[in-house]
Amino acid sequence: MKISARNQFSGQVTAIKTGPVHAEVVLKIAEGVELVSTLTQEGLEQLDLTVGSEALAFIKAFHVMLMAEDSDLIISARNQLSGKILTVQSARINAEVIVELADELRLKAIVTQEGLEELGAREGDSVRVVFKASNVLLGRRKLSRV
């Protein structure tokens, strides 16, 4: 499978909350690391997701924001994960930041160089990665027919 999203994770659905139009799905991608995704009821049915299902999550690096780990800011984004900056590849306008969330589990963020400098974040620093549930796209692998 080829897809342009820089962040691709597989995991198990641990919870589903349904509403009249939308659903919220929680996907465990590592011990202590869960992603929250919102999708339409129709999308939930098309993917045939249930608690215990295996699913894939895709997050574009441009949708990931960084916050200081000790920030006292309260925001509404459902996904706020703690991690440590492994690498920073700076460029003139944007920088690619790779954050380790758990052992070998890495998430990429593309942030402005100016924003990174204002945050003062460097390799080895603890940060929070933040992204909205609506920016987590879910998918499933097609089952092979025998």
Image (cartoon, rainbow, N blue to C red):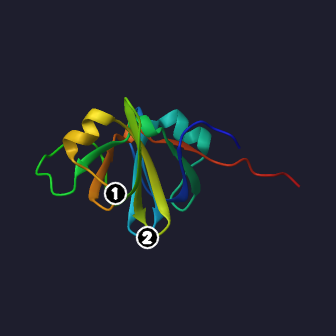
Instruction: From the viewer's perspective, tell me whether residue 106 is left or right of residue 66.
Output: right
Q: Earlier in the sequence, mark 2 or mark 1?
A: 2
Percent x, y of residue 126: 27, 60
State which mark lies toward you, 2 or 1: 1
Q: Inspect the image, locate mark 1, and give the three-letter code of the amino acid beneath it.
A: Glu
Q: Inspect the image, locate mark 2, and give the three-letter code of the amino acid beneath it.
A: Glu
Tell me which residue sits at (37%, 29%) in the image. Answer: 93
Q: Which residue lies furthest to the left in this view?
A: 72
Q: Are marks 2 and 1 in contact (CB under 8 Å)?
A: no
Q: Specify the label residue 135 is tagged with.
A: none
Q: Which residue lies furthest to the right in this view?
A: 146
Decide which of 120, 140 is in the foreground and name it.
120
Residue at mark 1: 123
Q: Taking the image as drawn, is residue 84 in sight?
A: yes
Identify the secondary structure beneath mark 1. Answer: loop
Tell me which residue sits at (53%, 33%) in the image. Answer: 42
Residue at mark 2: 31
Percent x, y of residue 123: 34, 57
Q: Quarter holding the C terminus?
A: bottom right
Where is residue 32, by image quadrant? bottom left
Tell me which residue sits at (54%, 62%) in the image. Answer: 52
